[in-house]
Image: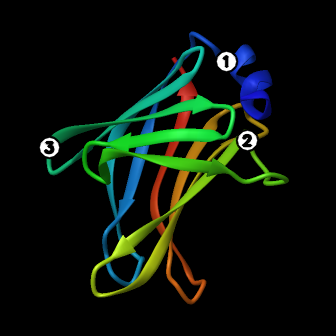
Amino acid sequence: MSMVQSWIDEFQGSEWNGRAELWIDPAGNEADMSESTLSIGSEILSYTWAYEGETKTGAFTFHDSGATWTDSWHQPEPVQCRYLTNAWGLFTVEYVYPVPSGPDWGWRSKLSQRPDNSLVLQMTNIAPWGEEGRAARMIFQRA
């Protein structure tokens, strides 16, 4: 967990509010928007967002080799994500998931801090041929 400990120490106990963008349009041009929240604890980052009026929740629980991720809509069963070293941002993790009709796909999640001190949580879906598509982005300001 040493890779993320410095920013966790800085932000531990903080609460954030913002807007979530969910791209489910196959062309990736239209986003579904909702309110979102972010909370940062000693070993966990949790967030909320909404889809079709229903609140969704997600969390990253950090440990030495990566993070366990759940999301009540994207990923209801916990999955093990590995840290990407030398990636920009506060943390970047990814995992590979099976697709019954073809080869495995990838999923990357990243938390970044902008120069204006807002936080951005991005999630990207990665096709087997390497093309990356926007999945979700949440932009937060400290509450």
CA distance for labels 1 and 2: 14 Å
**Residue found at the far left of this picture:** 53
The structure residue drawn at horizontal position 55% and vertical position 16%, both measured from the top left corner, is 41
Mark 1 crowdedness (10 Å alpha carbons): few <14, some 14-19, many ≥20 = some
The numbered disc on residue 53 is 3
Give the left or right position of residue 4, taking residue 32 as reference. Answer: right
Where the N terminus falls, by quadrant?
Answer: top right
* Mark sitting earlier along the chain (2/3): 3
Which residue was labeled with disc 1? 11
Residue 56 image point, x, y percent? 25, 39
Question: Real-space Cα distance between discs 1 and 3?
Answer: 29 Å
Residue type highlighted by circle 1:
Phe
Position of residue 73 in the picture relative to residue 81 (left or right): left
Q: Quadrant of residue 98?
A: bottom left
Q: Answer whether labels 2 and 3 touch (C-beta < 8 Å).
A: no
Q: What is the residue that sits farthest to the right in this orientation? A: 86
Disc 1, SS: helix
Horizontally, residue 11 falls left or right of residue 103, namely right
SS of the residue at dot 3?
A: loop
